[in-house]
Amino acid sequence: MAGDLSPLLVMNTKNFPSTVLRRALLGLGTAAVIAVGALAATSGSAAEVLADGELHEVRVSKDATVADALAAAEIELAAADDVQPDLDTEVVRDLRVVVTRAITVDVVVDDDDPVTVTAPVASVDGVVRLAGLDGLRDEGAVATPAWHDLVQDGDVISIQRPVEVVLEVDGDELTVVTLAAQVEHLLQLHDVELGPDDLVTPSAWAPLRADQTITVQRVEYVEDTEEVVLEHDEVRQNTSSLDRGRTRVDQEGRDGLRLDIYEVTLVDGEETDRELVDSEVVTESRDRVVLVGTRVPPPPPARTSTAGTSAGSSVGTSVWDRLAQCESSGNWQANTGNGYYGGLQFLPATWRSVGGSGLPHQASKAEQIHRAQILQQRSGWGQWPACSRRLGLR
């Protein structure tokens, strides 16, 4: 029927005035535009897709879903990615689809083995909650990064729970509850300064564990000097200047002195080690030299009377000369340092007991003989045991 009317309409246009014709055509154009708009409105919807930091504008057909919008934007999803609204949601006018990519983050608690979380979350708090560790925050644990900080794929979240440890330092023992992650941090919190040689057990870089004992030992190296006496020896030398059996000190001995320098290790004030680092002889020792007689004395003269053994006045000076020769090689000023003095080798105490003054070797020969006669009269020839026997005086 429409085909039949068309020619009629065309033919009749010639019979209408031009104004009427223009109005008719304008009305037909407007109707056509309205019809096209209605058709477009029923053909699909526009939507926005926000993914990976980019905003995509797409148009989808009628009854399309969020999944269709993602396909139109060429957005591919991983298994753990999150899409809002849900994939089966119908797309309506001005709908915005948000894609949150899943990230993989490790959560390490007290330096234990990590817990790996793969989820579409962006904050430390969210990751920890998904790991089932959200109760740690209530325990006072500290997270690094902080609880509200954002995280990215591949990040590691470290959580440190408070621990109770014992700190031994400078003679004190402290029980402390701390959030310090390492021994070094604990020492800093308690103002413990370490010297260059101090020992820390466990090491300052070790992680803190519950019920640990941290020990700080103060180590000091000091120098100690010891005086060592170098004892002298005695050397005996034979000499023909003395009769056999006689001795004389030719040189007095003297001890020497050596300084030994040690490096001493002190741990908490107690010596644990010492090492000799230097030694210096301040004074050399000097040997004591004793002369030993080897000379054979002359035979004593024949005894003609024994009366001289009972009275000093009857003993001639020649006897005292021979006795002095035996005792001191005839040296009336003998002072060898052996404690005996003079030609007849008096002890100072004996000399004074017979009225002598000063020291025997300082007196004249006559004085020494006089005092010897007094001693002989009082005590006999036994005061000179060896020589009196050698001379046949007893």
Image: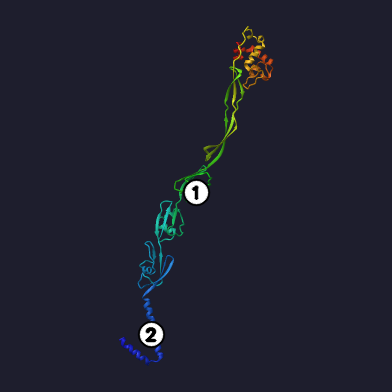
Label 1 element class: helix
- Which residue type carries mark 1? Glu
> Number of callouts in the render?
2
- Who's the residue at 57% across and 24% down the image? 234
Identify the image quadrant of the N terminus.
bottom left
Number of other residues with Cα within 10 Å of mark 1, as a class: few under 14, some 14 to 19, many 20 or more: some
Number of other residues with Cα within 10 Å of mark 2, as a class: few under 14, some 14 to 19, many 20 or more: few
Which mark, by number, is residue 184?
1
Q: Are marks 2 and 1 in contact (CB under 8 Å)?
A: no
- Who's the residue at 39% across and 86% down the image? 25
Q: Is residue 272 left or right of residue 66?
A: right
Q: Mark 2 vs mark 1: which is more N-terminal?
A: 2
> Which quadrant would residue 16 be assigned to in this image?
bottom left
Residue 245, percent from left and from top:
58, 17
Please state which of residues 103 and 180 is positioned toward the viewer in this rendering. 103
Q: Which residue is mark 2?
A: 28
- Which residue type carries mark 2? Leu
- Who's the residue at 39% across and 84% down the image? 29
